[in-house]
Amino acid sequence: GTEKMLAAAHNFVIEEGPRTLILMGLPGTGKSHIGYAVVYEAMERGEPSRFIGWGDLRELMLATFQRDNGGYSEPVDRATIPDLLVQFTGYKWLVIDDLGNGAPLTPWATEQLRTLLDKRFKDQDKRTIITTNVPVERFEQQFGAAVASRLKATNQQNEETPLQIVVRGKDQR
């Protein structure tokens, strides 16, 4: 687990191997730490990079919604969603930390995540790390079929299979 994760992170930083790295495992096993280290290294080289927790990214998306009787209705200002997508597809290096943590994805949030992943996968220069506690066999249930397909295997939009690494170990926090 850990040795494989470190080797994959090293190859990822030197831009060898798949452009998408998915680190799966229990909390406290170093997935976020590796993601942050990759972004830090890229920033040191002056490359556009961003580390963001899924909860924070979800909140940015939900901020474009208005509250209606305790729930969310349609987006109030759709112009902010394309802005967010442009921003997050613009980074050469992007880490989405803790994907699947928190409330289940709404159909709208699922569509925005699918769009973001599609845009990043189509650009040969973009590198993406996703960390998650969700096991691969629960991707479809947690993220929907379209997102699960993009995270699990090659498809029409993604010319390569993301490298999936299961990190095993005890919580080190």
Image (tube, rainbow, N blue to C red):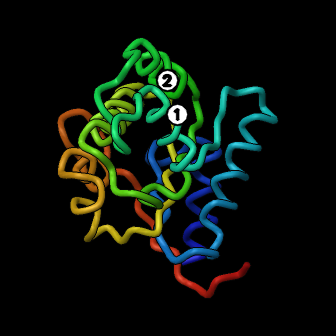
**149 relative to 139, above or below:** above
Mark carried by residue 164: none
Q: Mark 2 points at which residue?
A: 84
5 lies left or right of 142: right
Dot 2 alpha-carbon crowd within 10 angstroms: few under 14, some 14 to 19, many 20 or more = some
Image x and y of residue 152, in percent: 28, 56
Image x and y of residue 80, in percent: 46, 17
Q: Name the residue under label 1.
A: 60
Q: Is mark 1 on a helix, strand or loop?
A: helix
Q: Which residue corresponds to the image point at 69% horizontal and 51% vertical from the top-left?
A: 36
Q: Which residue corresponds to the image point at 36% horizontal and 71% vertical from the top-left?
A: 135
Query: Which residue is the extreme one toward the top?
Result: 79
What amino acid is found at the position of numbered circle 2 in the picture? Leu
Q: Which residue corresponds to the image point at 76% horizontal and 44% vertical from the top-left?
A: 40
Q: Distance between the residues labelled 2 and 1?
A: 8 Å
In the depicted view, which residue is nearer to us: 60 or 170?
Answer: 60
Marks 2 and 1 in Cβ contact (< 8 Å)? yes
